[in-house]
Every structure is written in C-alpha cells, then in structure tokens.
Image (cartoon, rainbow, N blue to C red):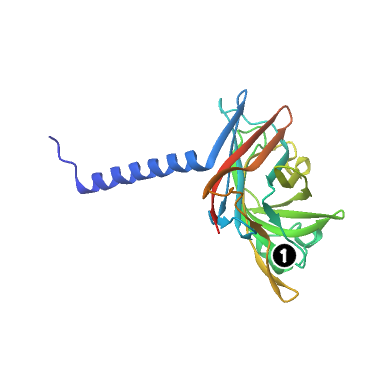
Amino acid sequence: MKTISPAARAALASVILAACFTTSLLAADAEPIQRGNLRVSVSGGLSPHSLPRHGSRGVSVTIGGHVRTTDRSSPPQLRRIELDINSHGHLDYGGLPVCHLTDIQPSTNTKALQACPGARVGEGLFFAEVAAGGQAPFPSRGRLIAFNGIEGGHHVIFAHVYGTDPLPTSYTVPFVIGHAKGTFGTTLTASLPHVTGKSSFITGIKMSLHRSFRSHGRTHNYLSAGCPAPPGFSVVPFDFMRASFTFSDRKLSSVLHRTCRAVG
C-alpha cells in the first residue's frame, strides 16, 4: 500500500474539512430557489439561539442572498429586494441617532462612519458583476455599513457600499422599514434601479444587523426577539424570514424556516 506523506495527508485533511464545512454551511444556512436558469440562494439566521418564551432579548440578525445563473450567463437586473421578518422580532430605533443620505453619499466607508458614528446598526458585503467596453463582466465587491436613517419621512436602513475594484465606487441602498400584521411583522424593502445602471448586475448581499444603545437612561436593543414555543415545548421551528427578489423579467420568493430554544 502506498504511503501518504505527512504534507499530503495534511493537505487532504484540509480539503476534506473545507468540503464538510461548506456542505454543512449550505445545508444549514442557504436555501436555493430557482426559476428558469436563475437561482438565488437565500441565507439568514439569528443569534443567540436561546430566547425568552415570554418577552424578548437583544439579538443579531443576518440576512442575505446570492444570485447566479445555471448556464453562467449574466443575471437579469435585480430591481427590488423585500425582506419580511417574523413578528416575534422587534425593531427599536427610538432615541438612536439618525443618518441622512447626504451625510454618507458619496463617501468611503471610513468617512461615512465619521459622519454618522452613532447611527451604525450593522455591516456586511455587497457583490456585483460589472460589464465595460464590450468585455466579459468581471466580479466586484464592496464593504457594506448599515446606518439608522430617515429618507422621505420614512425610517430606513441605509446600506452604504464602498468598493475599490476596479475603480473607487460608492453608493447607498435605502431599505425602507415597514410594519405588517400576521406572521411577518417587520418589512425591509429596497428599490435598486438607481444603483445598478445598465452595466452592473447585483450578484449578492449579506448584512448583519445588531446594536445596543442608551436612550433616556435605559439600554435599548436595535433588534430583539422571543421564541414562540407553546407550553411543554422547548425547541420550536418558525418562519424566520420571507425573502423576495424582483428582477427585470421575473420574481423569486422563499421562506426561511429556523428553530429557537425557549427559555423560561
């Protein structure tokens, strides 16, 4: 039997570990939805997993989507993102400093943070493909900083994106905060035509929201949640988020199902 060198064995172990990690991450976090050749992998979750059965506690929420085509063609233009979050989650921005679009656009992430240091509520990444001069599209990415904001009289989350490849690029995506009755109580809606133009194709976004702050002598959580477990049950599945992606020629929607552990 052929002997494997220690270096080769270590390399093989790294490959196996990476494959197992990727597989478990995709199985646990990302859920693909497909229509024709277009596929969107939706991801999301909250931390901590253990939450009060009665009342709520501060949480961190991660939401995102990755766009691709099965035939490797450029995806259609993404025009609208709608994220509906379970009604057992609560958003509290009362007393939190407010940022305005003119404060952060255009600017780098660093300058945006300097302009609105107290309004930061999260961070993430933004991915796109950019076509220029008849050439094949090339990938581009940018760092995303989320700010508590006001636009047109509406409370919003400003997703400020800044990238340097191939050229410095700055833009801001407002997610308008709305409220509804039923399974999903908080809605985040972003319209994107002014961002993408005709030569850019959004291929992914990942945003983590979390913040604790002091207001009127009390500590507040920007996001808080409880676990909707009925009496006698400690772990319960629930509809965490409904995500809808509207493109120039079709719409894809999916509901993410997660579980939580009730405490108390």
| The furthest residue to the front | 232
Tell me residue 139's x, y (percent). Answer: 58, 41
Q: Position of residue 39 (x, y in %)?
A: 59, 31
Which image quarter: residue 150? bottom right
Front residue of 240 and 233? 233
- Looking at the rendering, which quadrant does residue 130 occupy? top right
**Residue situated furthest bottom in the rendering:** 217
Q: Position of residue 73 (x, y in %)?
A: 60, 28
Q: Which residue is the extreme one toward the left? A: 1
Q: Residue tagged by mark 1?
A: 119
Residue shown at the point (43%, 39%) measured from the top left: 23
Query: Label 1 sits on what residue type?
Result: Ala
Q: Tell me residue 40's x, y (percent).
A: 60, 34
> Which residue is found at the position 87% from the left and 53% from the top?
152
Closest to the observer, 213 or 50: 50
Tell me if residue 53 comes above or below residue 2 in the rendering.
below
* Extreme residue toward the top, this view: 36
Q: Can the viewer see residue 63?
A: yes
Q: Quadrant of residue 42?
A: top right
Which quarter of the rendering shows the C terminus? bottom right
156 to the left or right of 71: right
Name the image quarter holding the N terminus: top left
Query: Could you tell me which residue is drawn at 69 percent across and 36 percent down?
Result: 245
Compared to residue 119, the image places residue 126 above or below, namely above
In the rendered image, the vertical position of residue 99 relative to residue 176, given as above or below: below
In-front residue for pair 237/29: 237
Q: In percent of the image, x 56 and y 27: which residue is there?
A: 70
Q: Secondary structure at mark 1?
A: helix
